[in-house]
Image: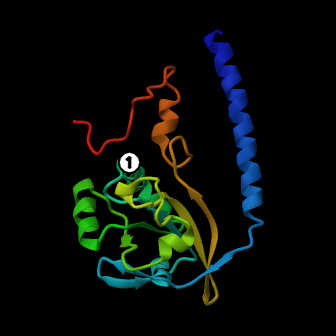
């Protein structure tokens, strides 16, 4: 197939994807919010309630990160770091992981991360939100933690979750996969790494 014909066919597919995104957005607007408790998490300056993470904003994005043992989650977080100011202009943004606070601090400093972080340590937050499966054989090293994002909203005195989605290879939350998709031959051996030096 010629370059022009291939690009035309791909653009037609992209138009279908854009239409599906519009449908998803319309469906999202009909969601019945899920009431959640005001969890206490481990913050960098001591215990912090979920309600405090809103930092005066109506909406809160919590990234469920699998922690320092996952190079893929690190790649996602590196990407969020680059757009953090844009995200934080619209909603509060926090990355949560199972690592203890001191481990988070060292790892974040080494990567130059600017966003706030909290630890699941001592909380059922990740399990209750569906981002940890106790005893899951998914990966014993990572303890059954799952990556994704939950969006919370202040609703008077309540906190509600209005959406969430898991992260995975090829998802809409990591630009790396979409740029690689533009290279004609896939590289099935490619995996995210902490460093490429």
Horizontal relation, residue 16 to residue 111: left or right: right
Question: Which residue is depicted at the point 48% across and 25% down?
Answer: 186
Quadrant for the N terminus, please: top right
Residue on which disc 1 sits: 75
**Residue 114 as seen in the image, left or right of residue 184:** left
Residue appearing at x 39%, y 83% in the figure? 48
Q: Secondary structure at mark 1?
A: helix
Please determine whether, in this image, residue 105 is positioned above or below residue 158.
above
Q: Position of residue 98 (x, y in %)?
A: 37, 67
**Image quadrant in which you'd find residue 118:** bottom left
Q: Residue at x 52, y 36 (%)?
A: 178
Q: Is residue 66 above or below residue 185?
A: below
19 displayed left or right of 128: right
Toward which corner of the image does residue 102 lie, by quadrant? bottom left
For mark 1, does the 10 Å Cα neighbourhood hold few (<14), some (14 to 19), or many (20 or more) residues? some
Say left or right for 21 vs 95: right
In the rendered image, residue 44, in percent from the top left (x then y), is placed at: 30, 76
Foreground: 31 or 129?
129
Instruction: Give the farthest residue toward the bottom.
Output: 157
* Position of residue 158 measured from the top left corner of the image (x, y, whole percent): 62, 86
From this view, report whether residue 175 is shown above or below residue 70. Answer: above
Q: Quadrant of the C terminus?
A: top left
Which of these two is toward me, 127 or 19?
Answer: 127
* Residue 177 picture location, percent across and down: 49, 37
Q: Residue at x 47, y 77 (%)?
A: 124
Residue 171, quarter of picture: top right
């Amino acid at each position: 197939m010629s370059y022009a014909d291939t690009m035309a066919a791909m653009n037609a597919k992209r138009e279908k994807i854009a239409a599906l995104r519009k449908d998803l957005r319309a469906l999202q607007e009909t969601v019945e919010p899920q009431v959640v408790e005001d969890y206490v998490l481990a913050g960098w300056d001591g215990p912090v309630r979920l309600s405090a993470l809103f930092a005066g904003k109506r909406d809160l994005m919590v990234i469920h990160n699998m922690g320092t043992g996952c190079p893929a989650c690190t790649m996602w977080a590196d990407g969020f770091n680059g757009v953090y100011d844009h995200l934080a202009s619209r909603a509060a943004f926090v990355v949560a992981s199972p690592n203890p606070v001191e481990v988070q601090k060292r790892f974040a400093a080494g990567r130059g991360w600017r966003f706030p972080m909290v630890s699941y340590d001592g909380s059922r937050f990740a399990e209750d939100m569906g981002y940890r499966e106790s005893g899951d054989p998914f990966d014993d090293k990572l303890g059954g933690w799952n990556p994704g994002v939950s969006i919370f909203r202040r609703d008077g005195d309540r906190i509600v979750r209005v959406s969430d989605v898991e992260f995975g290879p090829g998802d809409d939350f990591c630009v790396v996969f979409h740029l690689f998709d533009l290279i004609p031959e896939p590289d099935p051996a490619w995996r995210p790494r902490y460093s490429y030096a």
